[in-house]
Image: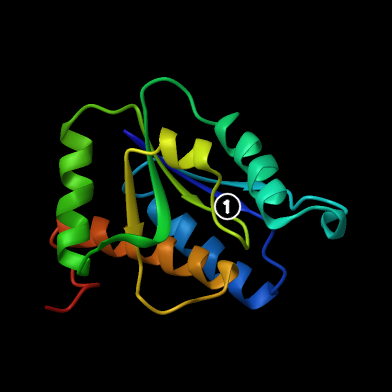
Amino acid sequence: MKIQLIAVGRTTDARLQSLIDDYIGRLGHYIPFQLEIIPELRQTKSLTPQQQKEREGELILQRITDGDWLVLFDEGGREFTSVAFSQYLEKRQATGARRLVFVIGGPYGFSPAVYAAAREKVSLSQMTFSHQMVRLFCVEQIYRAMTILKGEPYHHV
């Protein structure tokens, strides 16, 4: 199984991007992982939030293929401890999905079409974080999950 993270908009903070790149590099030792950035929409001032979600949704859905297990990072999603998240990833690996695709939406969330295509929603916290920070938290938690599954000491119980 491969894991892909799709995110809307680029990371503008070089320090955050450096940390994201570090964890992506580490993940390569455990599982095929890819981060795909959907460029932010241009001229959004003329768009309503709903129109922006719809356009971003179209771009997200273009990247999803048959057999993908689509999971949205969403404030209304299921919360996990790190150990439970590692067990979740292990279960997803065992089900035979070709790709596990996580998506971080744009500033207004997801369109109804993206919600309809998703198999699950996951929440990192009840708190709100910037989309750029969520990318870092996501790749770090996937890395942490892999080390937990391998019994490595990165995660201290």
In the visual, does 36 lie left or right of 9?
Answer: left
Give the answer, above or below, for where 119 lies relative to 138: above
Which is more toward the observer, 88 or 113? Answer: 113
Residue drawn 39% across the image and 66% down it = 140
Front residue (pair 153, 125): 125
Q: Position of residue 129 (x, y in %)?
A: 50, 76
Few, some or many C-alpha atoms within 10 Å of disc 1 (few <14, some 14-19, many ≥20)? many
Q: Quadrant of residue 11?
A: bottom right
Residue in view at x 51 percent, y 41 percent: 112
Q: Nearer the viewer, residue 100 or 1?
A: 100
- Left/right placement of residue 42 relative to residue 25 reads right
* Position of residue 20 measured from the top left corner of the image (x, y, whole percent): 53, 65
Q: Position of residue 30 (x, y in %)?
A: 31, 48
In this picture, is 82 found above or below 37? below
Residue 62 shown left or right of residue 80 in the figure: right
Location of residue 21 with respect to 40 vertically, above or below: below
Residue type (three-letter) at the residue carrying disc 1:
Ala
Q: Residue at x 60, y 40 (%)?
A: 57
| Relative image position of residue 122 (x, y in whole percent) | 33, 57
Q: Which residue is mark 1?
A: 7
Q: Foreground residue, 7 or 2? A: 7
Q: Could you tell me which secondary element the residue under label 1 belongs to?
A: strand
